[in-house]
Amino acid sequence: MKTKPLLKLTTVFKCLALTSTIFGIVSCGGGGGISSDVVNSTSDSQNIVTVTPALGALSSGATVKAMKPDGSTITSSKTDTTGSATLNLGTYSGPMTLAVSGGTGVTYFDEKSSTNLPFGSTDTLLSVVPSSAVTTGASYGVTALTNMAAAFAGVSTNGVISGNTTDTINTNITNAVAKTQLAVGIPADQINILSAPKAVSSTNSKLSGSGTDVKYGLVLAELAKSSTGTALTQAKGLATSATNSLASPSLPISGSEYTQVVNKINSIVATPSNLGNNFLASGATLPTVNLVAPKTTTTSTEVATTATTVTTTTNTVTCAQAGNFPDVSLKTNYIDKNLDGKTNWDSNSSLKPSVKVTCSNGVVSVVSNGVPNFDSIGTGKNGTDVAFKVNNVTWKFPQNPTLASTTTSLKNVLGPVAVLINGVQIYGPVESPTDNYADPFLNGLLNYCGGHVDTYHFHSFPECFFNQNTLGGTSTFLPAKTPGVVLGYALDGFPILSPYEACTDTSDTSCVNGVKEIKSSYKYTGTGSYGTESAFDVNTYEAGYNGSTLDKCNGKKDAKGNYAYYATRQFPYYLACYSGTKTAQ
C-alpha cells in the first residue's frame, strides 16, 4: 500500500523517560561533555527533596550529601529525628550521587541483632540518581541495594560517577539500577530500589500498610536478618560483589553477602509468608510482593540498555531479553508526534499497546497486539491518517541463539522477520511484487517512523524512537546516539542494536563525543528510479564499504564474540539475511 512520505522530522535530543513505581528513571541524551552548564539545568523553583537512609532506620545527625557527577557537592544536610534529611538542590536537576555518612553518636537499628549500632564518620552509604528523578518533592532511599547499584555505576570513593557525557552517565545509572534489581530478583514494578523505604527503628517498631515503602522496608529488614554480619557489613559486601563482578564481567556475581541476599530472596519467592514474620505489625495484612528468582549469572551484557528492566510493569523478567521490552501501555512511553498530549487510545481503548514477554524452555515469546506506541499519522494511502489495526500475535525466537553454518537470504521475502521492543513487527526491506520489490523507504511509501498501513509494520529505521517527544515529558522513547541500545530481536534470536558504537580516533570526523554511527556495507547501484527497481538487485554488498564493519546480513560480533544485527539508516535497514536459524512461528 503506497503512502506519501512524511519525512520532515523535528530532532529533539532529550531523555528516555521510563516510569517506575514512584518516579521516572531516565537515560538522557545530549552528548555534551560534563560541565556545570550541561548537567546543571535551571528552573524557576527550588528542588526540595527528601532522603531516607535505611540500614534499618538511622538516628539523627547523619550527614546526607548530594553531589554532581564530577564529585563536587551540590548541598548537604543532616538526618532529623525521623531519620530523614531534607535537601535543597536549588536549580540543579542533573544526575547525582547521594552519600550518607555517620559521626559521633549516630546509630542505625540493626534488624539482625535488634540493637542500635554505631554508624561512624568513616561509614558511607551511596545511591545514584538519574536526571529525570531529580525533581522537587521527590523522595529517595539510600540502602544496601542502592549501595550495590552505585558500585555497578562505577562511583568512585569521592563520588565521581563513571561517564564522560550526560547521556552516558544517565545510561550507566539506569543500567546499574536495572542490573541490581535483576541480580537480586526484585522487579521494579514491585519495588523501585531508588525509592524511600519505611525502615524498622526499634525492637518495638513494626511496619504496617501495603505501600511500596512498607514492602521495601520489609524486604530490607528480612535481608538484614539473614546477613552474615550486620546490615552495614551487608551493604559493604553487596558493593564489593558488584565491583568484583565489573572486574570479571564474564563471571557470575559472587560474594558472601550477595549470596545471603540471593538465598533470602529465593526463600521469599518459595514461601512468601517468610516476608514480614519478624517485622510486620500484629494484625497487619502482608503486602503483596511478587519477587522473581535472582539472576545469579547476570553480567554487564545482560542489561544492554536502561533501561527497560527497571520500567517494565507487565513483564516478568525471566531472561535478559524480557528486560529489554518496556511497558508500552504506559503513557510515559508513548511518542506524541503531534504534541497534542493525547494517545490513540484516548478515543479508542482497543488501540492501547500491549506487550508481554516470557521465556520458557529456551524460547522467548513476545505476545503483542501489534499496536504501535506512537501517533497514527501518515500511515494510510496517499499519506492519510488511518487508525492502527489490532494485530494479536505471538513472536517466538531462541533465548540462546547460535550462528548457522550458512546464512538464509531475505531477498524478496515478504512478511515479518523481526520484532521491535514496542511489540510491532519488522518486515524485510522490500515491498510487494506489485511494487516491483522496491525499497519502500526510498520509494516514499513510509510514514515518519519508518513503517506504514493500518496493520502497521516497519521497513526502515525507527526514527521516531529517537527524536520525538513522549508523554513522559521532555523526553524521547530511546536514548539517541548511545551504543548498545536494544531495538528488537530478529526471529532467529539475535538482538538488533541501535547503530552506534564507542570510538576513540579523534582524527575520524565521524567519531563525535566518543560515539560513531555504524553504517551498512551495501552500495546503491541503481539509477534513482526507486519505484521500478528491485531493492536487492540495486544494492550490492561490499565488505568495508563506506567504512562499515557489518557483514552481509547487517550484523557483526563484538569484542566478546557476541553477535548482533544493527539497525542502519541505509539498506537493508535491519537485516538482509538470517545469520542464525529462524524459530517456527
Image: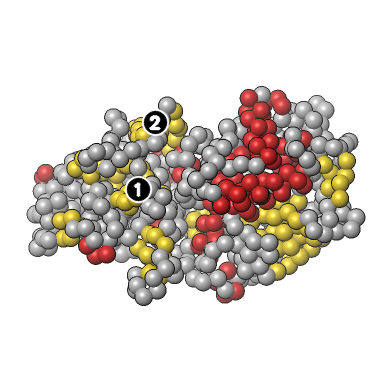
Q: Nearer the viewer, mark 1 or mark 2?
A: 1
User: Would residue 262 appear left or right of 425 to someone viewing this image?
Assistant: right
Identify the amino acid type marked 1.
Ala
Q: Residue 215, image x and y in percent?
A: 70, 37
The alpha-carbon separation of the residues under discs 1 and 2 comes to: 18 Å
Residue drawn 11% across the image and 44% down it: 433
Front residue (pair 230, 177): 230
Give the residue pinned by disc 2.
363
- Number of on-image labels: 2
Image height of 584 relative to 463, above or below: above
- Residue 13 placement: quadrant: bottom left
Q: Residue 417, image x and y in percent?
A: 27, 41
What secondary structure is found at the residue carrying circle 1?
strand
What secondary structure is found at the residue carrying circle 2?
strand
Front residue (pair 250, 77): 250
| Precedes in sequence: disc 1 or disc 2 | 2
Residue drawn 69% across the image and 41% down it: 257
Q: Residue 479, image x and y in percent?
A: 45, 57
Q: Residue 185, image x and y in percent?
A: 59, 37
Judge whether residue 452 can be spotted in this image: no
Identify the amino acid type marked 2.
Val
Residue drawn 72% across the image and 47% down it: 235
Judge whether residue 567 can be spotted in this image: yes
Give the residue pinned by disc 1.
564
- Residue 71 placement: quadrant: bottom right
**Most distant residue in the right direction:** 105
User: Would residue 411 appear left or right of 209 to someone viewing this image?
Assistant: left
Q: Residues within 10 Å of mark 1 (few under 14, many from 20)?
A: many
